[in-house]
Image (cartoon, rainbow, N blue to C red):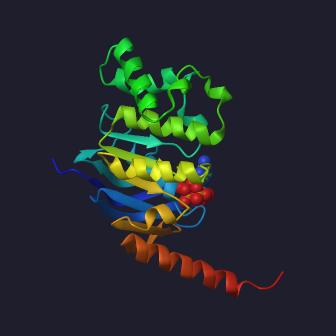
Amino acid sequence: MKAGLRLTDLTLRRGQTTVFERLDLALTEPRVGLIGDNGAGKSSLLRLLCGLEQPQGGRVEVDGTVVDGTPPPPGRIGLMFQNPDEQIIFPTVEEELALGPQAAGASRRDAKAAAHEALRRRGLADWAPRAIASLSHGQRQFVCWLALDLAAPRVRLLDEPYASLDLPGQAWLREEIRRAPAQVLVSSHLLGPLRDFDRVIWLERGAVRADGAGAEVCAAYEADVARRIADRPPC
Ligand SMILES: Nc1ncnc2c1ncn2[C@@H]1O[C@H](COP(=O)(O)OP(=O)(O)OP(=O)(O)O)[C@@H](O)[C@H]1O
Protein backbone atom coordinates (compact mmCIF):
# COMPACT_ATOMS: atom_id res chain seq x y z
CA MET A 1 0.00 0.00 0.00
CA LYS A 2 1.51 3.31 -1.11
CA ALA A 3 1.26 6.20 1.40
CA GLY A 4 -0.20 9.33 -0.12
CA LEU A 5 -3.26 10.93 -1.63
CA ARG A 6 -4.39 10.48 -5.19
CA LEU A 7 -7.21 12.06 -7.19
CA THR A 8 -7.75 10.45 -10.57
CA ASP A 9 -9.91 11.86 -13.37
CA LEU A 10 -12.00 13.56 -10.72
CA THR A 11 -15.19 15.42 -11.53
CA LEU A 12 -17.28 17.24 -8.92
CA ARG A 13 -20.44 19.17 -9.71
CA ARG A 14 -22.71 21.07 -7.39
CA GLY A 15 -25.97 21.92 -9.10
CA GLN A 16 -25.06 23.94 -12.17
CA THR A 17 -21.50 24.54 -10.94
CA THR A 18 -18.66 22.32 -12.11
CA VAL A 19 -16.11 22.49 -9.31
CA PHE A 20 -13.57 20.00 -10.78
CA GLU A 21 -13.47 18.53 -14.28
CA ARG A 22 -11.20 15.52 -14.75
CA LEU A 23 -8.67 16.63 -12.15
CA ASP A 24 -5.58 14.48 -11.54
CA LEU A 25 -3.31 15.02 -8.53
CA ALA A 26 -0.94 12.83 -6.54
CA LEU A 27 0.15 14.22 -3.17
CA THR A 28 2.94 12.47 -1.29
CA GLU A 29 4.93 15.39 0.17
CA PRO A 30 4.77 15.79 3.96
CA ARG A 31 3.54 19.40 3.70
CA VAL A 32 1.29 20.60 0.90
CA GLY A 33 -0.36 24.03 0.66
CA LEU A 34 -3.52 24.91 -1.26
CA ILE A 35 -4.05 28.50 -2.33
CA GLY A 36 -6.37 30.36 -4.69
CA ASP A 37 -9.26 32.79 -4.83
CA ASN A 38 -12.56 32.30 -3.03
CA GLY A 39 -14.49 29.53 -4.72
CA ALA A 40 -11.43 27.99 -6.40
CA GLY A 41 -12.17 24.58 -4.87
CA LYS A 42 -9.80 24.33 -1.88
CA SER A 43 -12.39 23.25 0.69
CA SER A 44 -14.03 20.94 -1.84
CA LEU A 45 -10.72 19.16 -2.41
CA LEU A 46 -10.23 18.62 1.33
CA ARG A 47 -13.81 17.42 1.76
CA LEU A 48 -13.39 14.92 -1.09
CA LEU A 49 -10.21 13.56 0.47
CA CYS A 50 -11.88 12.80 3.77
CA GLY A 51 -15.05 11.44 2.19
CA LEU A 52 -17.44 14.22 3.19
CA GLU A 53 -18.17 14.82 -0.48
CA GLN A 54 -18.61 12.25 -3.25
CA PRO A 55 -17.45 13.00 -6.82
CA GLN A 56 -19.63 12.41 -9.87
CA GLY A 57 -16.68 10.86 -11.67
CA GLY A 58 -13.19 9.58 -10.99
CA ARG A 59 -11.55 8.28 -7.88
CA VAL A 60 -10.08 9.50 -4.58
CA GLU A 61 -7.55 7.29 -2.81
CA VAL A 62 -5.89 7.66 0.58
CA ASP A 63 -2.90 5.39 1.12
CA GLY A 64 -4.11 3.15 -1.70
CA THR A 65 -7.68 2.79 -0.34
CA VAL A 66 -10.55 4.23 -2.36
CA VAL A 67 -12.60 6.82 -0.43
CA ASP A 68 -16.19 5.68 -0.92
CA GLY A 69 -18.19 7.59 1.68
CA THR A 70 -17.81 5.05 4.47
CA PRO A 71 -16.07 6.57 7.50
CA PRO A 72 -12.26 6.10 7.34
CA PRO A 73 -10.71 4.00 10.10
CA PRO A 74 -9.37 5.98 13.08
CA GLY A 75 -5.83 7.08 12.45
CA ARG A 76 -6.00 7.44 8.67
CA ILE A 77 -7.21 10.96 7.85
CA GLY A 78 -8.80 13.88 9.68
CA LEU A 79 -10.09 17.35 8.80
CA MET A 80 -9.83 20.58 10.76
CA PHE A 81 -12.91 22.42 9.53
CA GLN A 82 -12.89 26.02 8.34
CA ASN A 83 -15.65 26.74 10.85
CA PRO A 84 -14.86 25.25 14.30
CA ASP A 85 -18.56 25.04 15.09
CA GLU A 86 -18.94 22.43 12.32
CA GLN A 87 -16.24 20.29 13.93
CA ILE A 88 -16.77 20.56 17.68
CA ILE A 89 -19.50 18.30 19.01
CA PHE A 90 -19.02 18.25 22.80
CA PRO A 91 -19.86 21.04 25.27
CA THR A 92 -16.48 21.15 27.05
CA VAL A 93 -12.85 21.25 25.94
CA GLU A 94 -11.80 18.05 27.75
CA GLU A 95 -14.68 16.04 26.29
CA GLU A 96 -13.90 17.26 22.78
CA LEU A 97 -10.21 16.44 23.13
CA ALA A 98 -10.90 13.00 24.61
CA LEU A 99 -12.89 11.95 21.54
CA GLY A 100 -9.90 11.02 19.35
CA PRO A 101 -8.12 8.81 21.89
CA GLN A 102 -11.41 7.12 22.78
CA ALA A 103 -12.17 6.43 19.12
CA ALA A 104 -8.73 4.82 18.90
CA GLY A 105 -9.58 2.49 21.78
CA ALA A 106 -8.44 4.33 24.93
CA SER A 107 -10.60 4.07 28.03
CA ARG A 108 -12.59 7.15 29.00
CA ARG A 109 -10.22 7.77 31.88
CA ASP A 110 -7.06 7.44 29.74
CA ALA A 111 -8.56 9.58 26.99
CA LYS A 112 -9.32 12.36 29.50
CA ALA A 113 -5.80 12.07 30.93
CA ALA A 114 -4.37 12.42 27.39
CA ALA A 115 -6.52 15.52 26.85
CA HIS A 116 -5.31 17.08 30.10
CA GLU A 117 -1.69 16.28 29.29
CA ALA A 118 -1.97 17.83 25.81
CA LEU A 119 -3.35 21.03 27.34
CA ARG A 120 -0.78 21.07 30.14
CA ARG A 121 2.15 20.76 27.69
CA ARG A 122 0.88 23.86 25.91
CA GLY A 123 0.34 25.91 29.06
CA LEU A 124 -3.44 25.60 28.74
CA ALA A 125 -4.22 23.31 31.70
CA ASP A 126 -7.03 25.54 32.90
CA TRP A 127 -8.90 25.12 29.61
CA ALA A 128 -9.92 21.51 30.34
CA PRO A 129 -13.28 22.17 32.05
CA ARG A 130 -14.13 25.23 29.99
CA ALA A 131 -17.34 25.35 28.03
CA ILE A 132 -16.73 25.58 24.27
CA ALA A 133 -19.38 28.30 24.22
CA SER A 134 -17.12 30.44 26.43
CA LEU A 135 -14.22 30.38 23.92
CA SER A 136 -13.54 32.89 21.17
CA HIS A 137 -13.53 31.76 17.53
CA GLY A 138 -9.72 31.66 17.49
CA GLN A 139 -9.62 29.71 20.74
CA ARG A 140 -12.05 27.19 19.21
CA GLN A 141 -9.60 26.82 16.33
CA PHE A 142 -6.92 25.89 18.89
CA VAL A 143 -9.28 23.26 20.28
CA CYS A 144 -9.91 21.90 16.78
CA TRP A 145 -6.17 21.57 16.12
CA LEU A 146 -5.59 19.91 19.52
CA ALA A 147 -8.46 17.49 18.88
CA LEU A 148 -6.93 16.55 15.54
CA ASP A 149 -3.51 16.20 17.14
CA LEU A 150 -4.89 13.86 19.80
CA ALA A 151 -6.72 11.81 17.17
CA ALA A 152 -3.31 11.60 15.45
CA PRO A 153 -4.36 10.65 11.92
CA ARG A 154 -1.58 9.96 9.40
CA VAL A 155 -3.03 12.66 7.13
CA ARG A 156 -4.24 16.00 8.51
CA LEU A 157 -6.31 18.33 6.35
CA LEU A 158 -6.53 21.92 7.60
CA ASP A 159 -9.08 24.24 6.02
CA GLU A 160 -8.16 27.89 6.62
CA PRO A 161 -6.67 27.14 10.04
CA TYR A 162 -5.16 30.63 10.39
CA ALA A 163 -8.36 32.51 9.61
CA SER A 164 -9.15 33.66 13.15
CA LEU A 165 -5.77 33.34 14.85
CA ASP A 166 -3.89 36.34 16.21
CA LEU A 167 -0.17 36.70 15.44
CA PRO A 168 1.02 34.61 18.44
CA GLY A 169 -1.59 31.99 17.56
CA GLN A 170 -0.40 31.86 13.94
CA ALA A 171 3.19 31.35 15.09
CA TRP A 172 2.03 28.66 17.52
CA LEU A 173 0.11 26.77 14.83
CA ARG A 174 2.99 27.01 12.34
CA GLU A 175 5.25 25.37 14.90
CA GLU A 176 2.65 22.71 15.71
CA ILE A 177 2.33 21.90 12.00
CA ARG A 178 6.10 21.87 11.56
CA ARG A 179 6.47 19.26 14.29
CA ALA A 180 3.41 17.12 13.50
CA PRO A 181 4.31 13.52 12.67
CA ALA A 182 1.82 13.44 9.82
CA GLN A 183 1.24 14.44 6.22
CA VAL A 184 -0.40 17.86 6.42
CA LEU A 185 -2.42 19.68 3.75
CA VAL A 186 -3.17 23.31 4.52
CA SER A 187 -5.59 25.50 2.62
CA SER A 188 -4.91 29.16 3.38
CA HIS A 189 -5.37 32.73 2.20
CA LEU A 190 -2.50 33.65 4.51
CA LEU A 191 0.53 32.80 2.38
CA GLY A 192 3.36 33.32 4.89
CA PRO A 193 2.97 29.94 6.60
CA LEU A 194 3.07 28.12 3.24
CA ARG A 195 6.13 29.72 1.67
CA ASP A 196 8.55 27.18 3.06
CA PHE A 197 6.43 24.16 2.10
CA ASP A 198 7.97 21.81 -0.46
CA ARG A 199 4.81 21.98 -2.47
CA VAL A 200 2.00 24.48 -2.92
CA ILE A 201 -0.84 24.09 -5.41
CA TRP A 202 -2.59 27.17 -6.77
CA LEU A 203 -6.14 26.30 -7.73
CA GLU A 204 -8.03 28.48 -10.17
CA ARG A 205 -11.67 27.66 -10.86
CA GLY A 206 -11.07 24.01 -10.00
CA ALA A 207 -7.93 23.56 -12.12
CA VAL A 208 -4.27 23.62 -11.16
CA ARG A 209 -2.85 26.96 -12.25
CA ALA A 210 0.59 26.37 -10.67
CA ASP A 211 2.19 23.57 -8.69
CA GLY A 212 5.66 23.70 -7.17
CA ALA A 213 7.82 24.99 -4.35
CA GLY A 214 5.91 27.14 -1.86
CA ALA A 215 7.96 30.31 -2.29
CA GLU A 216 7.60 30.29 -6.09
CA VAL A 217 3.91 29.43 -6.28
CA CYS A 218 2.96 31.96 -3.57
CA ALA A 219 4.97 34.67 -5.37
CA ALA A 220 3.31 33.83 -8.70
CA TYR A 221 -0.15 34.05 -7.13
CA GLU A 222 0.66 37.38 -5.46
CA ALA A 223 1.95 38.78 -8.75
CA ASP A 224 -1.21 37.66 -10.53
CA VAL A 225 -3.41 39.27 -7.86
CA ALA A 226 -1.40 42.51 -8.11
CA ARG A 227 -1.89 42.50 -11.92
CA ARG A 228 -5.62 41.92 -11.59
CA ILE A 229 -5.96 44.76 -9.09
CA ALA A 230 -3.93 47.10 -11.33
CA ASP A 231 -6.14 46.20 -14.32
CA ARG A 232 -9.39 46.90 -12.49
CA PRO A 233 -11.31 49.86 -13.85
CA PRO A 234 -11.38 52.77 -11.37
CA CYS A 235 -14.50 52.94 -9.17
N1 LIG B 1 -22.97 24.28 -0.46
C1 LIG B 1 -22.70 24.60 -1.72
N2 LIG B 1 -23.66 24.53 -2.68
C2 LIG B 1 -23.39 24.83 -3.97
N3 LIG B 1 -22.19 25.23 -4.40
C3 LIG B 1 -21.21 25.33 -3.51
C4 LIG B 1 -21.40 25.03 -2.12
N4 LIG B 1 -20.24 25.22 -1.47
C5 LIG B 1 -19.35 25.63 -2.39
N5 LIG B 1 -19.93 25.69 -3.61
C6 LIG B 1 -19.28 26.07 -4.87
O1 LIG B 1 -18.20 25.17 -5.09
C7 LIG B 1 -17.10 25.88 -5.64
C8 LIG B 1 -15.85 25.60 -4.80
O2 LIG B 1 -16.07 26.09 -3.49
P1 LIG B 1 -15.04 25.85 -2.30
O3 LIG B 1 -15.75 26.16 -1.03
O4 LIG B 1 -14.42 24.53 -2.47
O5 LIG B 1 -13.95 26.98 -2.62
P2 LIG B 1 -12.75 27.52 -1.72
O6 LIG B 1 -11.57 27.64 -2.65
O7 LIG B 1 -12.59 26.71 -0.51
O8 LIG B 1 -13.26 28.97 -1.35
P3 LIG B 1 -12.99 29.91 -0.06
O9 LIG B 1 -11.58 30.45 -0.23
O10 LIG B 1 -14.02 30.99 -0.19
O11 LIG B 1 -13.17 29.08 1.19
C9 LIG B 1 -17.48 27.35 -5.72
O12 LIG B 1 -17.90 27.61 -7.03
C10 LIG B 1 -18.65 27.45 -4.77
O13 LIG B 1 -19.55 28.45 -5.21
Quadrant position of the C terminus in the picture:
bottom right
Which residue occupies 34% across, 16% down? 110
Q: Answer with left or right where residue 41 lies relative to residue 226.
A: left
Residue 9 in view here: yes
103 left or right, relative to 137: left
Q: Residue at x 61, y 51 (%)?
A: 166
Q: Residue at x 38, y 32 (%)?
A: 150
Q: Quadrant of ligand 1?
A: bottom right
Q: Is residue 144 above or below residue 217?
A: above
Q: Nearer the viewer, residue 74 or 138?
A: 138
Say whether residue 103 is left or right of residue 90: left
Q: Residue at x 42, y 67 (%)?
A: 201
Q: Toward the viewer: 61 or 181?
A: 181
Q: Nearer the viewer, residue 70 or 46?
A: 46
Residue 215 in the image: state x and y as whole percent.
42, 74
Task: Residue 17 in the image: state x and y as whole percent.
Answer: 58, 60
Q: Residue furthest right?
A: 235
Q: Residue 162 in the image: x percent, y percent? A: 55, 52
Q: Is residue 15 visible?
A: no
Total marks placed: 0
Give the x, y percent position of residue 57: 39, 55
